[in-house]
Amino acid sequence: MSITQGTVLITGASSGIGAIYADRFAKRGHDLVLVARDAARMETLAERLRSETGVAIEIIPADLTADADVAKIEARLAQGDVGILVNNAGMSLNGSLLENGPENISRIIALNITAPTRLAAAAAKAFVAQGKGAVVNIASVLALAPEMFDGIYSGTKAHLLNLSQAMSAQLSAQGIYTQAVLPGATRTEIWERSGKDVDSFPADMVMDVNELVDAALVGFDRRETVTIPPLADIIQFDAMQAARAAMRPNLSKKAVAERYRVSETL
């Protein structure tokens, strides 16, 4: 069972990861606020979950690439009854940096970076006032593997990982729990929407969305800062974190590193 109470606001809630989160939190007894562009699909989901669980479900149609719609969700978070934010809405692109124009690049940044950052900030302010709350940011394993695929998508997910770790370090003492969830390839509609074929991947690389969310919720209940459902050996991630921490004291110095000094013999 969840140890965080209150209404759960989920973005990208009409399908895929967001819809499964809605199902799982409703079955834990949480009221829901569902946010996505497709109101009809959210209503179908809400009708089923109301019937099965009896929880109250609010639907807010919103395009989170639009400033006015992001502001609408910020205002909803400010009302103070939401206890958990699941920042799930996101998109991918078909093609690389060289194959996408300004409109597509601006859109993915708006949806994958600007919107979740603004909503995390709005939620955190409301939660700090209450002394409790949780923010779940759906990132990606590609945040750890920028060399794979296009750097735009992985860069947006690296931002969410960075944001989550910073929030955890800075806000946990004020009662705010922050979790970054890093899925690998997961069978959702994001592939079709971005013109990719998920079946082109080896079958053992693609996780079922139900298994992904259930694993993420195990991490949530354990209060993990970073949850990586496909990673069997957490020692690998811990080693990377330890190496990063060891490097941190050496990242800002008055003196230039010796390896960058111009040789006097030149």
Image (spheres, rainbow, N blue to C red):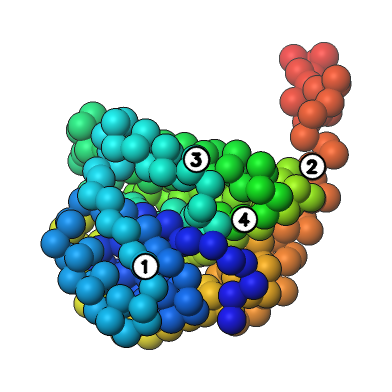
Comparing labels 3 and 2, the label whose residue is closer to the camera: 3
- The first of marks 2 and 1 along the sequence is 1
The residue identified by callout 4 is 133
Which label's residue is closer to the chain start, 4 or 3? 3
Tell me the residue at 59%/57% (across/down): 134
- The residue labelled by disc 2 is 248
Three-letter amino acid code at the position of disc 4: Gly
The amino acid at mark 2 is Arg
Which mark is drawn over residue 56? 1
Residue at screen point 42% across, 57% down: 9
Residue drawn at (18%, 71%) of the image: 44
Report whether residue 68 is seen. Answer: yes
Disc 4, disc 3: CB below 8 Å? Answer: no
Residue flagged by tag 3: what amino acid is it?
Ala
Cα–Cα gap, marks 4 and 3: 13 Å
Instruction: Choose between 253 and 36: the one closer to the eye.
Output: 36
Q: Quadrant of residue 41?
A: bottom left
Disc 1 marks a residue whose amino acid type is Ala
Of the residues tagged 2 and 1, which is closer to the observer?
A: 1
Q: Is residue 165 above or below residue 5?
A: above
Closer to the eye: label 3 or 1: 1
Question: For mark 3, what is the residue?
Answer: 78
Circle 1 packing at 10 Å, graded few (<14), some (14-19), many (20+), is: some
Relative to 162, is 51 on the left or the right? left
Mark earlier in primary sequence (4, 1): 1
Residue 175 lies, in percent from the top left, at 72, 53
